Image (tube, rainbow, N blue to C red):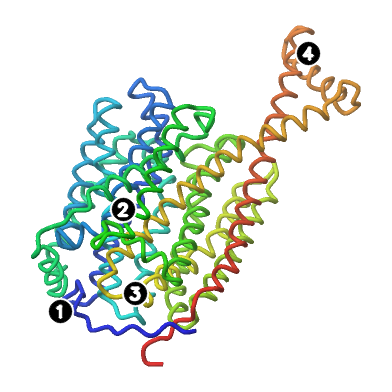
Amino acid sequence: MTAAPEVFDGTRSAAGERNPWLIAIVVSIATFMLVLDTSIANVALRYIAGSMAAGVDESTWVITSYLVANAVVIPVSGWLARVVGRKRFYMLCVAVFTASSLLCGLAPNLTLLIVFRVLQGLGGGGMAPSEQSILADSFPPDKRAQAFALYGVAVVVAPTVGPALGGWITDNWSWNWIFFINVPVGIASLLLVQWLLVEPQALKQERNELLEGGLHVDWLGFVLVALSLGCLEVVLDKGQRDDWFASDFIVFFTAVSFIALVIFVPWELTRREPIVDIRLLTHRQFGLSFVAMMALGATVFATIQLLPQLLQENFNYSAALSGLVLMPGGIVMLILMPAAGWLTGKVQPKYLIALGMLLTAYGLYYMTSFSPDSDFDFFAWARCLQMVGAPILFIPITTISYAGLPPEKTNEAAALINVARNEGGSIGVALVTTMLAQRAQFHQSRLVDSVVPTSPQLQESLQQATRHFASTGASAPDAQHQALGLIGQMVQNQSQLLSYIDVYFALAIIAAAMIPLALLLRPVEREGR
């Protein structure tokens, strides 16, 4: 069955009499700033911890607090945009994000920095859904793919630029500037939005109708979704550090998240005005798009963390250099985004999504061929292969998610699609972090079992290492002790490298498993055909 074509009358457009492409550029400015901030702080945690006399584990709350605040706001942003007014809500989000960025850079201690990061996450959480809703309403269905291609440059490229930029800033200036750089961009975005965007009459009328009978706030729904997704973010971000369910802390937050979700779903399904319209997930097209976006978020965000970590820990790359490895992949996406937007208008999205998953799976599988001798060129090329599929995934998924939905549901649909991307990313990062630790232990135990004292290879390696350390002036007992330590370090390094190979292979399988899912999507009948 083919989904019926959408009728576009332009009454919900945020462009008014202006060119909608101008609006697409304006909202992409804030998008780039927002998405950049999700990855730029990761490389600065050591510097933040050092300057504030805090432990690295404590400093990770700088990341966790932002993710939790994002998780709380994103699902309810569609409802908030309807109640407050989309343009007003969007400007409020940009203003809060910009002001809290300044406060983050000025924070004198870790406690205040975490508080300001919560504010930053609350402001940032509402921006992306509002932007996608603006684009969906401002462009006819046959032009949305190209509009999302422009928007996708910010959404998909910014995370790859973040680690490189963050590493360079922290190496050459100070960590404070990773927040200060948001301020001029945020101010420029506010001025341009105020000047160029309009609040369509259709949205004003919907808001008035919503408020006429008195505002009925689904407070219980808000509390339940905040508890469910907020606690889930804490579990995903802190689980591996706290040894998962061996920790009472993790067990408690998991239980709260699960119980809140179990109550939330039937509650929202029975509300006349739910704060999160989860009925959208029952639409075949939107529900499958939601799952596909989660898979995309998992692979993109997981690999953004995975590759710099591998290079810094096992190949002695600096933060800036490991970030630079990601840059060629960002350039590939920048080049392919317009082509992917054009293709989405010509080829059925379901086939493009299947192709994107196949290319992503191949790129991840190619990464399993790295060795201890692999150089910068290998990792940069492997990253390019991984990112070839991202534009062919992001644009069709985003575009097809709105197909067949009533126009008044764009705010809610945009919110849920962003929940999928963010939660997919968090799940992906948690998955690879846990799998790395477990597989490293597995490989280390296997390697240790194979290192037996009677092994000729072990004896020869020990003798060579002992002679080396003795030649540097160490006594015979010290040289032998240092040689044993060197062998132990080699075993540990080898087990870590093998664990990274396992993780990339697992991610490749996940991407490949999404191909049949993509083919279940309905074909889209385009207007005028």
- Residue shown at 52%/70% (left/top)? 353
Q: Earlier in the sequence, mark 4 or mark 2?
A: 2
Task: Indicate which disc, 3 or 4, sits on the residue closer to the N terminus.
Answer: 3
Image x and y of residue 127, in percent: 27, 56
Q: Is residue 64 left or right of residue 207?
A: right
Q: Rounded to the nearest whole Å, what is the CA distance between mark 3 and mark 4?
A: 71 Å
Disc 4 residue type (three-letter): Gln
Which label is found at residue 405?
Answer: 3
Upstream in the sequence, badge 1 or badge 2? 1
Looking at the rendered structure, which numbered label has been put on residue 74?
A: 2
Q: Secondary structure at mark 1?
A: loop
Q: CA distance from mark 4 to mark 1?
A: 80 Å
Q: Could you give the CA–CA distance between mark 4 and mark 2, rounded to whole angstroms?
A: 58 Å
Looking at the picture, which amino acid does disc 3 mark? Leu
* Percent coordinates x, y for residue 53 in the rendering: 35, 20
C-alpha span from label 2 to label 3: 19 Å
Amino acid on which disc 2 is placed: Ile
Instruction: Kindly identify which numbered label has been placed on residue 480.
Output: 4
> From what the image shows, is residue 163 above or below residue 240?
below
Q: Is residue 114 above or below residue 381?
A: above
Give whichever of 269, 124 is nearer the camera.
269
Percent x, y of residue 68: 34, 42
Closer to the camera, 412 or 151?
Answer: 412
Rounded to the nearest angstrom, the CA distance separating label 1 from label 2 is 30 Å
What x and y, as percent, mark residue 192? 17, 62
Crowd band around label 3 with a 10 angstrom C-alpha radius: few (<14), some (14–19), many (20+): some
Mark 1 highlights which residue?
17
- What amino acid is labelled 1 in the image? Glu
Which callout, 3 or 4, points to the residue nearer the camera?
3
